[in-house]
Image (cartoon, helix red, strand yellow):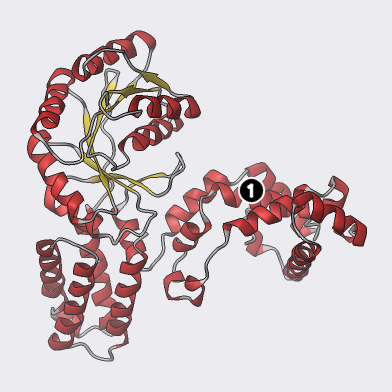
């Protein structure tokens, strides 16, 4: 996410860090470049102006100009101000002491609201809660069917009543939740292509009738200032509690994320970072600032790894590595765990320094991993454990069974042999690098 913004900011910040001595003049020049980058990313003009003014006021202080590393100090100031702009600290959902907690999702057509409702339901279910999804958008064709399909896929209950207007439907869903033991109710309300009076009046009536504990405005992160303008109008009418930015895995320029908090004075609570239903992340301003400035996000990387890693398998793998017994079976298991962490390009983006690395330009071919899986799946258990058995006829059988070529099979085996050699060297020199059975690639 924010690849273009990150790349341009990184170029400006490297210039600042490369200055042997900073003066008020070259600080001002550098910050003008930062402002230009922000405006190109579709950040609100006033937000960009105020941000630069705040950075400049701190950057020209004596403690910076006299610092041994003034460039690093300025980058630190930019980071701190970026965190403040994004919200300072994580804003969590507020749950009612007396169930059910009522969450109302609002937004325009096409912002990803219905998908978000499904993602939020899955997220809350994973937190040990019992969510009920409510199909309150009776106007958009197939909106109800879409949510029912999502609910079925995720194992979540969807509430809907035929020939019922949305206000009564939402009110009835709360009674249903109380009767059937659901502790969270999530309304998927109707949107429009643009803000109009009937839509707002209906949302206001739902709010007045059901008194939701959380109203979340869902904004398309790829629409820039259009999302900010819509958020401002929704805020004036509904006084919502938090913001959800969707589609941040696309080519979002970053303007909405960097502007919306400052304009509405409401926190960003979640971000959607992919199409899958587990691609919803709580929003951490400090982590996002770190990503935007190309510093990576080690904490999120570790959290993803912890969710993906099977501890028992990791311990068994560590023992095998110590004995240099790494097989294609182990390789396949590691591949499955990495896939659980999400798209590889997103994982790479969390690694510190990756933005400045030549590897940033490498396009990761997810299909190559599918091909590797197909090849290994076409092997017998014995062949996975003892790859040296693979002669010409066996390789041909595996290639045919996996829809690949003998050359593809040979390439995988060569890469695996190289990995085995590396592991043998490491095991002879001590296995500290493998403590905890971490990922090998």
Is residue 245 something that shows in the picture? Answer: yes
Residue annotated with mark 1 = 336
Q: Residue furthest top?
A: 179
Q: Is residue 182 above or below residue 248?
A: above
Q: Position of residue 417 (x, y in %)?
A: 79, 67
Q: How many marks?
A: 1
Q: Residues within 10 Å of mark 1 (few under 14, many from 20)?
A: some
Q: Position of residue 231 (x, y in %)?
A: 16, 45
Q: Could you tell whether 322 is left or right of 277 in the image?
A: right
Q: Is residue 91 above or below residue 24?
A: above
Q: Could you tell whether 141 is left or right of 150 in the image?
A: left
Q: Nearer the viewer, residue 141 or 197?
A: 141
Quarter of the rendering containing residue 258:
bottom left
Q: Is residue 8 above or below residue 265?
A: below
Is residue 319 something that shows in the picture? Answer: no
Q: Could you tell whether 170 is left or right of 129 in the image?
A: left
């Amino acid at each position: 996410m924010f690849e273009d913004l990150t790349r341009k900011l990184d170029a400006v910040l490297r210039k600042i860090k490369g200055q042997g001595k900073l003066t008020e003049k070259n600080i001002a020049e550098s910050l003008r470049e930062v402002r230009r980058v922000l405006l190109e990313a579709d950040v609100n003009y006033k937000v960009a102006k105020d941000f630069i003014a705040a950075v400049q006021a701190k950057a020209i202080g004596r403690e910076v100009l006299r610092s041994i590393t003034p460039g690093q100090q300025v980058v630190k100031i930019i980071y701190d101000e970026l965190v403040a702009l994004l919200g300072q600290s994580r804003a969590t959902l507020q749950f009612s002491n007396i169930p059910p907690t009522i969450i109302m999702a609002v937004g325009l057509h096409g912002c990803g609201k219905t998908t978000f409702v499904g993602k939020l339901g899955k997220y809350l279910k994973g937190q040990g809660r019992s969510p009920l999804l409510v199909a309150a958008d009776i106007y958009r064709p197939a909106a109800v069917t879409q949510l029912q399909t999502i609910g079925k896929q995720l194992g979540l209950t969807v509430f809907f009543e035929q020939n019922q207007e949305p206000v009564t439907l939402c009110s009835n869903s709360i009674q249903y939740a109380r009767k059937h033991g659901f502790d969270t109710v999530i309304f998927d309300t109707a949107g429009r292509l643009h803000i109009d009076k009937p839509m707002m009046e209906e949302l206001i009536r739902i709010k007045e009738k059901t008194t939701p504990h959380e109203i979340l405005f869902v904004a398309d992160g790829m629409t820039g200032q259009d999302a900010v303008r819509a958020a401002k109008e929704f805020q004036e009418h509904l006084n919502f509690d938090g913001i959800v930015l969707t589609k941040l895995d696309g080519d979002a320029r970053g303007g909405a994320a960097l502007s919306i908090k400052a304009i509405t004075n409401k926190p960003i609570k979640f971000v959607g970072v992919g199409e899958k239903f587990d691609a919803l992340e709580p929003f951490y301003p400090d982590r996002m600032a770190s990503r935007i400035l190309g510093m990576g996000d080690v904490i999120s990387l570790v959290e993803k790894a912890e969710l993906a890693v099977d501890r028992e398998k990791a311990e068994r793998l560590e023992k095998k590595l110590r004995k240099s017994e790494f097989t294609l079976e182990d390789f396949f298991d590691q591949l499955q765990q990495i896939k659980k962490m999400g798209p590889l390009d997103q994982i790479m983006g969390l690694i510190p320094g990756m933005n400045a690395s030549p590897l940033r330009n490498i396009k990761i071919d997810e299909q190559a991993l599918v091909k590797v899986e197909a090849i290994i799946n076409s092997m017998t258990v014995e062949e996975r454990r003892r790859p040296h058995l693979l002669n010409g006829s066996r390789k041909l059988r595996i290639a045919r069974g996996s829809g690949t070529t003998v050359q593809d099979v040979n390439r995988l085996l060569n890469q695996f042999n190289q990995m085995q050699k590396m592991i043998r060297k490491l095991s002879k020199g001590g296995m500290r690098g493998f403590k905890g059975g971490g990922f090998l690639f």
